[in-house]
Image: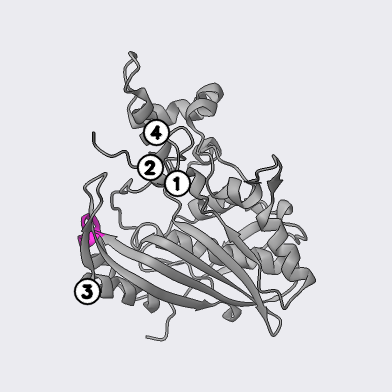
């Protein structure tokens, strides 16, 4: 019961027992929700919090984080690397904008194949502007230039270990929900919207605030992704590892995932894996997926469940 993975499993159980049923107004998808929870992982042990009670797609975690860090916004990079966790949102936008066109609608499989094979089509339909990578690395300003929040935060803690201000945010109201003009909306719901770096006694910690969290499908990726981000920044700055702290706003379990979660809760966590860096890095722009090796990852088989494409821009019925 001292295994750190039980924090996640206990949160799953609490949502099953106490979650309040809610229905998304756009999709009609139901979920069971709690508000205001936190789990903490001590990375100074050398263990890496990649869940073992169901196999997590590590290649997806690694390439998605690189996609963020490198400031990319087109899913073609992910598709070319056989990572399909972002396919649904560009396809949703394609369907919304295709309503007025006369040519036949592509199926999702045809759409993704065309993203992979046709660079011009990918430039037109594969973009998800104003999401994590762009806002981390190229936050737009009123005077036309952009701000590299990620590099600034890393430099801030290197130069000032006592800094209280090393925040990176991806929540820009100008592009979100009914705050946005329709022509400006990203159509995508920014979920893990803010993280902060902090140094105490020579140890670097990272706290993530996630305002909306799909506990079964999304959160296992988020835990591994931000824990890996912390490891990368610790390598760059030279600090020892502290904690990854995952703070939730609305943390929820979709009704369609109930049986999958019950299956996962029958499983006992296995020993955690470790991360090995194959090359020294001194700058965030030097990071590449191939310099990271996952060591001794053992897990139960994956448990599949449908993704709910909830949130984002909502057009009120007329």
Residue drawn at the location 66% of the way across and 67% of the way down: 166
Local crowd size for mark 2, using a 10 Å CA cut-off: few (<14), some (14–19), many (≥20): many
* Eye-nearest disc, 2 or 4: 2
* Eye-nearest disc, 4 or 1: 1
Q: Which residue is mark 4?
A: 93
Q: Which residue is mark 2?
A: 313
In the image, 168 versus 265, the foreground residue is 168
Q: Is residue 85 visible?
A: no
Q: Earlier in the sequence, mark 3 or mark 2?
A: 3
Give SS at disc 3. helix
Q: Which residue is mark 3?
A: 18
Alpha-carbon span between mark 2 and mark 4: 10 Å
Q: Earlier in the sequence, mark 3 or mark 4?
A: 3
Q: Is residue 197 left or right of residue 2?
A: right
Alpha-carbon span between mark 3 and mark 4: 35 Å
Alpha-carbon span between mark 4 and mark 1: 14 Å
Q: Are marks 2 and 1 in contact (CB under 8 Å)?
A: yes
Q: Earlier in the sequence, mark 2 or mark 4?
A: 4
Residue drawn at the location 22% of the way across and 67% of the way down: 20
Residue 14 part of the magenta-drawn span: no
Task: Check residue 176 in the rendering and tell me which mark sits there, or answer none.
Answer: 1
Give SS at disc 2. loop
Q: Are marks 4 and 1 in contact (CB under 8 Å)?
A: no
């Amino acid at each position: 019961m001292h295994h750190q993975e039980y924090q996640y499993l206990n949160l799953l159980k609490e949502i099953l027992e106490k979650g309040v049923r809610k229905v998304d107004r756009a999709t009609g998808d139901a979920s069971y929700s709690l508000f205001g929870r936190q789990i903490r992982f001590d990375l100074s042990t050398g263990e890496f919090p990649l869940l073992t009670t169901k196999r997590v797609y590590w290649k997806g975690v690694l390439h998605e984080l690189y996609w963020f860090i490198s400031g990319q916004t087109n899913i073609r990079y992910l598709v070319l690397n056989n990572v399909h966790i972002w396919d649904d949102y560009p396809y949703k936008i394609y369907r919304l904008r295709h309503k007025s066109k006369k040519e036949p609608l592509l199926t999702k499989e045809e759409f993704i194949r065309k993203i992979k094979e046709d660079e011009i089509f990918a430039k037109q339909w594969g973009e998800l502007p104003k999401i994590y990578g762009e806002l981390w690395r190229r936050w737009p300003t009123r005077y036309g230039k952009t701000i590299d929040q990620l590099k600034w935060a890393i430099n801030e803690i290197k130069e000032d270990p006592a800094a209280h201000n090393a925040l990176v945010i991806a929540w820009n109201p100008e592009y979100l929900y009914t705050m946005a003009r329709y022509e400006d909306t990203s159509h995508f719901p920014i979920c893990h919207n803010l993280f902060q770096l902090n140094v105490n006694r020579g140890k670097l910690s990272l706290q993530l605030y996630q305002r909306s969290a799909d506990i079964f499908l999304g959160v296992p990726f988020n835990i591994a992704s931000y824990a890996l981000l912390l490891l990368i920044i610790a390598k760059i700055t030279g600090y020892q590892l502290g904690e990854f702290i995952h703070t939730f706003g609305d943390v929820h379990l979709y009704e369609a995932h109930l049986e999958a979660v019950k299956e996962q809760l029958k499983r006992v966590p296995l020993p955690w894996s470790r991360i090995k860096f194959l090359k020294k890095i001194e700058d965030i722009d030097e990071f590449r997926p191939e310099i990271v090796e996952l060591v001794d990852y053992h897990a139960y088989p994956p448990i599949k469940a449908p993704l709910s494409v909830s949130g984002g821009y909502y057009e009120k019925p007329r």
